[in-house]
């Protein structure tokens, strides 16, 4: 082990922007930010090289990054990212939701993509540093500050092997609802042509390539008037896996729930939180494969009462209808149901400080 691998935290140089967006313009941007279009004044960058390890940590003005045209990420796609939110709570404080889990998953994604594993303490330091600098960008009401840490291979080398240089960047975006429809039930398109991940692949890693591979299916979903695509497994094309950017849950007439097992899907932090919350209400939650044929049959008999998608960006969103080349499936009356609404209210309540945080999920920022 090299000496640098022991470094867990890092000192940041701080160079605030000389041209911050003025308060009036910012207030205008925060009125209806949508998702992923409004960015804050600053960003964090940390470099990694094989020789020096993590170094050159900076809190700085958000600006374009210059890259050598031979940078490995531009050729072989060595890139990973995370997504988490900072919330203003009902008492005016600011908090993150389970950020250690994002730090952990970022390491797991790095390991899968043959990239350096950023120490979790350093990841959390970066997140807290940016939230503190750009706290004025957290929208009021139901909005939040979506944090996007990412890392990519910067070495100028065309040989195919893990890069010896990487850049970690953290940006932040003021966001409202992910879906244009707001809180209403969403419609999903079942992709029968494209799959997202296979056994032994990168499905469990949060790497840009997974999303690149999903875009054609997502475009197909939009062409069919749907909000999101839902994928089946790659081997048999029958087992429901997840949406393009969210995990999925099925709720039955006896109050029990099923969610697809981990393996080829992204291990969602919202998914894990929902499992915990539902079990704490006494519900049975099975992490079990669920087929598209069963979905159709259970929707027809009324055994399947609710379906919802969940993730950091989407929070908890009822799925009302699923469309496919073989016909549509409507769930209930197509507008969502009470169990979905109840779980969403508990989750959001914990994040906002209105419901007791019995699991210790909330991390306040000073
Ligand atoms: N599945 C995919 C493919 C995602 O992109 C996301 C979003 O991060 C999720 C699931 C949900 O993960 P989380 O709840 O950690 O945001
Ligand atoms: C998230 O929920 O954080 C996601 O990454 C989903 C999508 C915006 C990629």
Image: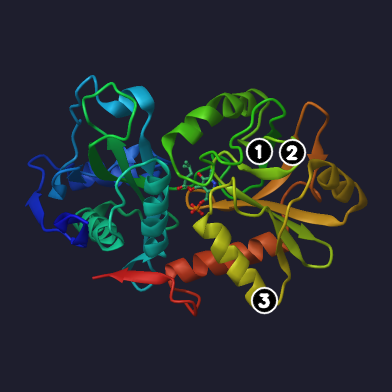
Q: Is residue 144 visible?
A: no
Q: Nearer the viewer, mark 3 or mark 1?
A: 1
Q: Residue at x 11, y 58 (%)?
A: 11
The x and y percentages for residue 71 are: 25, 25
* Secondary structure beneath label 2: strand
Please give the label number shown on residue 230. Answer: 1
Bin the neighbour count of mark 3 within 10 Å (Cα to Cα): few under 14, some 14-19, many 20 and up. few
Residue sitting nearer the eye, 135 or 240:
240
Is there a contact, CB below 8 Å, between mark 2 and mark 1?
yes
* Secondary structure beneath label 1: strand
Q: CA distance from mark 3 to mark 1?
A: 28 Å
Question: Quadrant location of the N terminus?
Answer: bottom left
Q: Residue at x 51, y 40 (%)?
A: 202
Identify whether 326 is placed above or below 18.
above
Bin the neighbour count of mark 2 within 10 Å (Cα to Cα): few under 14, some 14-19, many 20 and up. many
The x and y percentages for residue 277 are: 60, 71
Q: Which residue corresponds to mark 3?
A: 281
Q: Which residue corresponds to mark 2?
A: 322
Q: Is residue 232 toward the left or the right of residue 348 in the image?
A: right
The x and y percentages for residue 236 are: 75, 36
Q: CA distance from mark 2 to mark 1?
A: 9 Å
Q: Quadrant of residue 119?
A: bottom left
Callout count: 3
The x and y percentages for residue 105 are: 42, 54
């Amino acid at each position: 082990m090299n000496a640098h691998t022991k470094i867990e935290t890092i000192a940041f140089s701080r160079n605030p922007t000389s041209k911050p967006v003025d308060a009036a313009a910012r207030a205008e941007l925060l009125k209806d930010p949508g998702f992923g279009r409004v960015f804050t004044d600053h960003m964090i960058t940390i470099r990694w090289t094989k020789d020096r390890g993590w170094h050159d940590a900076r809190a700085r003005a958000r600006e374009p990054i210059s890259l050598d045209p031979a940078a490995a990420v531009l050729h072989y796609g060595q890139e990973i990212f995370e997504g988490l939110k900072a919330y203003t709570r009902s008492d005016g404080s600011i908090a993150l939701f389970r950020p250690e889990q994002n730090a952990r998953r970022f390491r797991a994604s790095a390991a899968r993509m043959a990239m350096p594993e950023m120490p979790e303490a350093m990841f959390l330091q970066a997140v807290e540093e940016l939230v503190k600098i750009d706290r004025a960008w957290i929208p009021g009401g139901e909005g939040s500050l979506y944090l996007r840490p990412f890392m990519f291979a910067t070495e100028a080398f065309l040989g195919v092997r893990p890069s010896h240089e990487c850049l970690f960047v953290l940006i932040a975006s003021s966001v409202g609802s992910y879906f244009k429809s707001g809180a209403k039930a969403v419609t999903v398109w079942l992709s029968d042509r494209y799959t997202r991940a296979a056994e032994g692949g990168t499905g469990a890693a949060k790497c840009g390539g997974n999303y690149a591979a999903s875009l054609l299916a997502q475009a197909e979903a939009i062409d069919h008037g749907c909000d999101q695509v839902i994928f089946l497994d790659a081997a048999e094309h029958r087992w429901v896996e997840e949406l393009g950017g969210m995990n999925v849950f099925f709720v039955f007439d006896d109050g029990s729930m099923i969610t697809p097992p981990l393996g080829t899907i992204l291990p969602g932090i919202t998914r894990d939180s929902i499992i915990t919350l539902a079990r704490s209400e006494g519900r049975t939650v099975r992490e079990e494969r669920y087929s598209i044929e069963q979905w159709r049959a259970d929707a027809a008999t009324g055994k399947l009462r609710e379906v919802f998608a969940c993730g950091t960006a989407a929070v908890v969103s009822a799925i009302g209808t699923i469309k496919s080349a073989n016909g549509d499936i409507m769930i209930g009356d197509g507008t969502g149901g009470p169990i979905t609404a109840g779980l969403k209210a508990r989750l959001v309540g914990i994040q906002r400080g209105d419901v007791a945080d019995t699991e210790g999920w909330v991390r306040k920022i000073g």
